[in-house]
Image: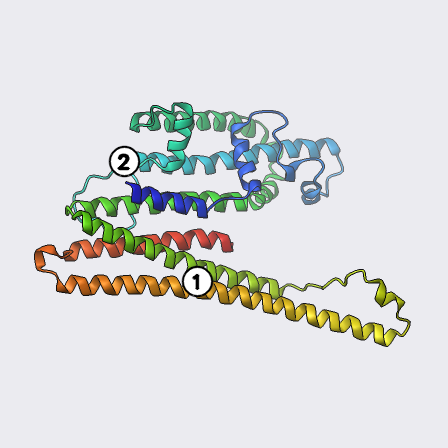
Amino acid sequence: SLEEQDLSQRLSQLSMTSHYITEHLNMVNVDTPTNIPLYLSKENKSFEQIISDLSSKELVEELRQMAIVIHQTFLIDLEKLLWTTYLKSGTGQLQLNHTDNDNLNRPHLWPNQVQKLVSKQSPDNIDTAACLTYVTQYLDELDDKMKRYQTTYNMKKNQYVNYLPTIQAFVHQQLQSTRLAIEQKIAIVHYNYNDYVLELKFLAYNPTHQQKQIVQKLNHAKYQEEITKEEYNLLKYRISIEESSPTSLELPKERLLKTIEDQSIQQKLRDQYINIAQQAKKDMIQLYLSSAQAQMDQYQKEFNTKLQQFQVKQQSLPDDKKFNSSMITLIEQRWKNMSDGVKCVYKYKLD
């Protein structure tokens, strides 16, 4: 539905990953001898530092090739986790976060990411069959690549068995951000799928057009409330990190200071400049915080007002015109799912 797609697109936009992470993931799709991540390149000395006890350059290069294989297998594993989640969502096999007491058939929901890729390949055909074919073919390609890398790994692992734990730990550490990015993508697929299921359950009660509009407005207000709250918390967190980090203010290259021969006056002017700059920085931070809090309070108030108006209206309606208790429960479950989804996105922003 349009409403579900809106939530899905919003969560996806919120979770944009860095170019560095995207670059790692793109490497899964490239099979060339030059497909070497920056941290394992010869120009980067971090790999050599972890095996610094080796004197043989040839052995270092052989271990570097082994590290590249481990890097690729780790990426493929992550990519398979993500695309298996896409497959489960698209074939109705995804585990629901909420208790599913009824016998509603699990819907098929292909994530936006899959639909976009399929539409590039065949713009006029993005139905379930096309999405299923695309995803299964891609998973097969990943399996083939994994087999090739696994074969290489198995052939060489006995030669370098003493170094493997160190290399594996190093590679996994370097790919920590990539792993977190994939986990976030997987979590968002779950939140979107749950939202879709809850929406279908709500629609099964045949709400009127007016009731649908009411829910849509409440959902939008709830989303704005959640986003501004998390933006405020994120800003506070980043400010706390900034304040805890030792920073030094650089003085402008002011010729006037150098012309002052009296060192005490020169130092006094420097101190005044630093004090003014520090105060200006504090004032700016406070302005950011105040603006973010004002926006958060505004959207919280708007949601509470809309909710109160809805509740008052409900009480004045005859029973056959009201939202029944099951519909209210589903609305609240969607809000909880939406809130959890937004928190998930911002959790990774904090990390």
Which colour style is shown?
rainbow
Q: Residue at x 87, y 66 (%)?
A: 258
Report crowding for label 1: few under 14, some 14 to 19, many 20 or more residues within 10 A (C-alpha). some
Indicate which disc, 1 or 2, sits on the residue closer to the N terminus.
2
233 vs 110: above or below: below
Estimate the x, y position of residue 338 in percent, counting from the top left: 34, 52
Q: How many marks?
A: 2
Please give the residue where the numbered disc 1 appears in the rendered image.
295
Can you tell which mark lies on residue 108? Answer: 2
The amino acid type found where label 1 is placed reads: Gln
Estimate the x, y position of residue 43 in percent, counting from the top left: 72, 37
Q: Secondary structure at mark 1?
A: helix
Q: Residue at x 84, y 72 (%)?
A: 266
77 vs 342: above or below: above
The amino acid type found where label 2 is placed reads: His
Estimate the x, y position of residue 244 in percent, counting from the top left: 61, 66
| Residue lying at the far right of the rendered structure | 261
Q: Residue at x 44, y 51 (%)?
A: 345
Q: Is residue 332 among the parts visible in the rendering?
A: yes
Tell me whether circle 1 and circle 2 mark residues in contact (CB < 8 Å).
no
Q: 163 or 207, which is in the foreground?
A: 207
